[in-house]
Amino acid sequence: MMRISRPSSPVVAAMIGAAAVTAQFVSGKAVRDALFLTSLDLTALPTMLLATSVCSILLVIASARAQRRFPPSTWVPATFVASGALFVVESLLRSHAPVAVAIAVYLHISAAGPILASGFWLIASERFDPHTAKKRFGQIAAAGTLGGLVSALAAERIAAAFGTPAMLPVLAVLQCGSAWLVRATCGHRATNRDREVPDHSSLRTITRRLKADSR
């Protein structure tokens, strides 16, 4: 019989990482929209969408250059930490410049969020061999979906109890946690021990039976 393999430690780290990355992106978008609608007029939205497109292009160019100079295991966690630090700065400045912070948060989450998510999946795709990826990526994606659902509910409760700006430090914590989980997912390069392969004892049994039948 084939043994049912349990998720290895890198897979578990990737599942938790997917949950954290999706959580910070989903809750971040809710915070972005709430701060924007309470600080700016709705007529400013087309301008913000245009500015977001420009920022996204610039970040993609910067990310591509970073990839040529540093391995993903270095620059992907670093981008999460930098994003978390920016959330801390935005939280500290919120009471002094609410409009400017609302604009900064909108650009921050809209432009950086997809790049951070793609960086996580780049790490995951490089970490696991094709067999493990085919077997486990569905579980990793499902964990990410669950993380997004939980974060949406938590963001609503925190915002209702303490106000929307209180979510900015929470997002900073999620970003730093995501950076740590990305590093845990990287670990060392996949070895034969990390790769989940079929039970070779079963294959040997089948081979012996085939040889016996051919005699």
Image: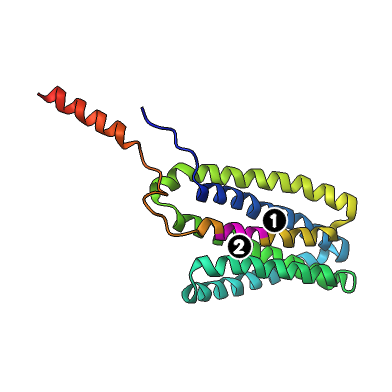
Q: Can residue 75 be seen in this view?
A: yes
Is residue 117 found left or right of 123 in the rendered image?
A: right
Image location of residue 115, percent across then percent down? 59, 64
Image location of residue 43, percent across then percent down? 82, 65
Q: Measuring 81% from the left and 70% from the top, which residue is drawn there?
A: 101
Q: Measuring 70% from the left and 66% from the top, which residue is drawn there?
A: 84
Where residue 116 is drawn, which disc sits there?
A: 2
Q: In which quarter of the image is the C terminus?
A: top left
Question: Is residue 52 in the magenta section?
Answer: no
Image location of residue 12, percent across then percent down? 55, 47
Most foreground residue, 183 or 15: 183
Most foreground residue, 99 or 207: 207
Q: Measuring 68% from the left and 61% from the top, which residue is drawn there?
A: 175
Q: Can residue 46 be seen in this view?
A: no
- Residue ranking furthest to the left: 215
Secondary structure predominantly adopted by residues drawn in magenta: helix
Name the image quarter holding residue 3: top left
Is residue 198 found left or right of 92 in the rendered image?
A: left
Image location of residue 96, percent across then percent down? 90, 74
Residue under label 1: 24
Q: Measuring 68% from the left and 63% from the top, which residue is drawn there?
A: 110
Label 2–label 1 contact, CB within 8 A: yes
Q: Which region is colored magenta?
A: 177-183
Tag 1 secondary structure: helix
